[in-house]
Image (spheres, rainbow, N blue to C red):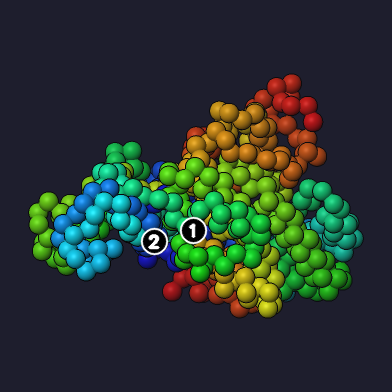
């Protein structure tokens, strides 16, 4: 559940929770088999569990897909992000990039002179054609284990970060804390 | 909102805002583009208003001298600062903030001006999103530029979600509806 | 679109309800007391197999006190469960008969919410592109202000970058909403390392 909430709130794609998902799906299989042999009350509870887990997994994967579609080219190119994709997500991302490019070429790029056909240039004033997640964007986070004095910015006084404290801040500032599990996004 | 994006339609529209320029060279054959008065020649020091994206580039290459858009003139800034909430931002520019962000490199006081304007006006946007509409709010809503109008809409959606759900109008997430 | 635009701006209320259902709650089954997750309690409740014991904070007395404290000028947000709005609503809808003075409770929850809303508006004044501490806000409340605060934060950040972070006045204290009453230290750091409160 925490992975789902973090993924929903983080501007960039996070590490793929493959093992957790596998365990969850195994549990679902196991519970599904048990359902038939149980009295109605228990069966209902088991079924609710299964349904809730299924919803969670689906929404988690969809959240990732939405991000992948948004920044497909960037994610497939950068090794840091490539490693975060599952195999099927990587296939999806590559397919998505190929489809998009094909569509652009057929629709209009092929009619342009060759030097105007690129899809991944940086313009003279630094505008990049490849969209990237903005890791400085605002997130709300809650402290899970006390961090202590934390420097949000080199020019500012450090601030005490204790368990249950809530902050709105830049994602990039607390990214390391998030990876260490010291804060969670909310 | 994020950094300017290549495909961001509002960023593209924002740089369509026109800025006054003074031509620094004589040009032949471009008379129809601006103050040439029907002849095909335009001369140095004649004045043009050009879209920002064009002016910025020509300015860099010293073909024109770009001036501060009247939207961000000292006089305008002073005037707006007096009562940010009553400024008809939309009629000044549909893309006031985004244009300002683009112009910021050229006019050092822009960040300060935009910041004051924005901070004052979002207070009111927050109030309106939390309360029901009245006439005063209606006038204010009409004065919002695109950045603000979009923010207001998002706020209203987010604010409306809780009462909607409490009155059971939200799509209820039950075990049957979550799983088709 | 793999998720809706609304979901990209935060959570939907049904999703928060979904999360809230994982919170524990006390019930009275046929004889003995038990604690279990809200979703299971609701299931048992619906089939008349238990009575739900209202959480201590969901009583007229407690909420009334909170309301008074919340209303004091310059006060922090009072402490409430992270999912208080959802749990209150779920219980008011599904287990109204297990609550004492459910009408009063409903009204107080609404009052509390309004006072807290006006406080978050105050918080908006202090928004700056670095950080703002907002302890004890519940997730539904955060979700409600998320678009406003997040987009404004990003706008201020861009203006800050434009100005070159040097001359931007970070007026006022950023910690008006810091919860000073919280004293539970984690063992990660010794308390001498932390600021005296």
Q: Nearer the viewer, residue A110 or B17?
A: B17
Q: Nearer the viewer, residue C9 or C98?
A: C9
Give the left or right position of residue B90, taking residue A145 as reference: left
Give the left or right position of residue C159, taking residue B27 as reference: right
Which residue reaches farthest top? C192
Residue appearing at x 33%, y 48% in the figure: B65
Picture coordinates of residue C52, whole percent (x, y): 76, 65
Picture coordinates of residue B93, whole percent (x, y): 47, 64
Q: Is residue B162 visible?
A: no
Q: Nearer the viewer, residue C163 or B106?
A: B106
Q: Quadrant of the N terminus of chain C?
A: bottom left
Question: Does mark 2 fall on the same chain as mark 1?
Answer: yes
Q: How many marks can you see? A: 2
Tell me the tag on residue B71.
1
Q: Quadrant of the C terminus of chain C?
A: top right
Tell me the tag on residue B99.
none
Q: Chain of mark 1?
A: B
Q: Chain of mark 2?
A: B
Residue appearing at x 68%, y 35% in the figure: A162
Q: Nearer the viewer, mark 1 or mark 2?
A: 1
From the viewer's perspective, is residue A72 above or below residue C166?
Answer: below
Secondary structure at badge 1 equals: helix
- CB atoms of marks 1 and 2 within 8 Å: yes
From the viewer's perspective, is residue A145 above or below residue C72?
Answer: above
Q: Nearer the viewer, residue B106 or B122?
A: B106
- The residue wearing badge 2 is B17
């Amino acid at each position: 559940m925490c992975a789902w909430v973090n993924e929903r709130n983080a501007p960039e794609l996070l590490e793929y929770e493959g093992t957790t998902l596998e365990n969850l799906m195994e549990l679902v299989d196991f519970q599904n088999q048990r359902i038939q042999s149980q009295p109605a009350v228990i069966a209902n509870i088991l079924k609710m569990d299964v349904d809730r887990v299924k919803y969670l997994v689906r929404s988690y994967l969809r959240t990732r897909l939405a991000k992948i579609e948004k920044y497909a080219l960037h994610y497939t190119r950068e090794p840091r992000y490539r490693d975060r994709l599952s195999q099927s997500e990587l296939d999806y991302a590559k397919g998505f990039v190929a489809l998009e490019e094909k569509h652009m070429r057929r629709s209009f790029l092929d009619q342009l002179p060759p030097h105007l056909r690129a899809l991944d240039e940086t313009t003279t004033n630094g505008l990049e054609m490849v969209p990237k997640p903005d890791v400085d964007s605002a997130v709300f986070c809650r402290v899970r284990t006390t961090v202590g004095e934390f420097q949000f910015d080199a020019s500012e006084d450090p601030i005490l970060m204790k368990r249950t404290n809530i902050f709105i801040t830049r994602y990039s500032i607390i990214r390391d804390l998030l990876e260490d599990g010291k804060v969670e996004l909310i | 909102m994020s950094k300017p994006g290549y495909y961001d339609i509002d960023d593209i529209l924002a740089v369509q805002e026109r800025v006054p320029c003074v031509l620094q060279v004589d040009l032949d054959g471009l008379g129809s583009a601006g103050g040439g008065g029907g002849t095909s020649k335009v001369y140095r020091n004649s004045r043009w208003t050009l879209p920002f994206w064009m002016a910025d580039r020509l300015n860099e290459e010293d073909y024109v001298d770009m001036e501060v858009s009247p939207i961000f003139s000292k006089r305008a800034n002073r005037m707006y600062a007096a009562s940010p909430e009553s400024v008809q931002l939309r009629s000044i520019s549909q893309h006031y903030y985004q244009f300002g962000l683009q112009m910021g490199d050229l006019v050092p006081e822009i960040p300060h001006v935009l910041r004051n304007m924005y901070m004052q006006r979002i207070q009111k946007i927050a109030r309106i999103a939390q309360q029901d509409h009245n006439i005063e709010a209606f006038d204010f809503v009409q004065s919002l530029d695109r950045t603000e109008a979009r923010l207001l809409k998002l706020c209203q959606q987010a604010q409306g979600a809780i009462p909607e759900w409490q009155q059971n109008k939200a799509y209820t997430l039950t075990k049957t509806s979550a799983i088709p | 679109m793999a998720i809706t635009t609304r979901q990209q701006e935060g959570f939907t209320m049904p999703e928060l309800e979904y999360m809230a259902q994982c919170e524990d709650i006390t019930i009275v089954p046929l004889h003995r007391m038990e604690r279990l997750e809200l979703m299971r309690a609701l299931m048992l409740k619906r089939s008349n197999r238990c009575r739900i014991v209202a959480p201590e904070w969901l009583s007229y007395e407690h909420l009334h006190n909170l309301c008074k404290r919340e209303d004091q000028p310059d006060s922090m947000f009072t402490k409430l469960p992270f999912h208080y709005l959802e749990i209150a609503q779920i219980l008011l809808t599904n287990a109204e008969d297990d609550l004492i003075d459910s009408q009063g409770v409903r009204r107080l929850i609404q009052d509390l919410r309004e006072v807290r809303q006006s406080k978050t508006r105050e918080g908006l004044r202090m928004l700056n592109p670095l950080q703002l501490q907002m302890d004890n806000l519940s997730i539904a409340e955060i979700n409600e202000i998320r678009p406003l605060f997040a987009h404004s934060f990003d706008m201020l950040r861009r203006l800050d970058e434009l100005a070159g972070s040097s001359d931007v006045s970070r007026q006022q204290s950023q910690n008006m909403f810091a919860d000073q009453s919280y004293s539970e230290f984690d063992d990660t750091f010794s308390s001498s390392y932390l600021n005296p409160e």
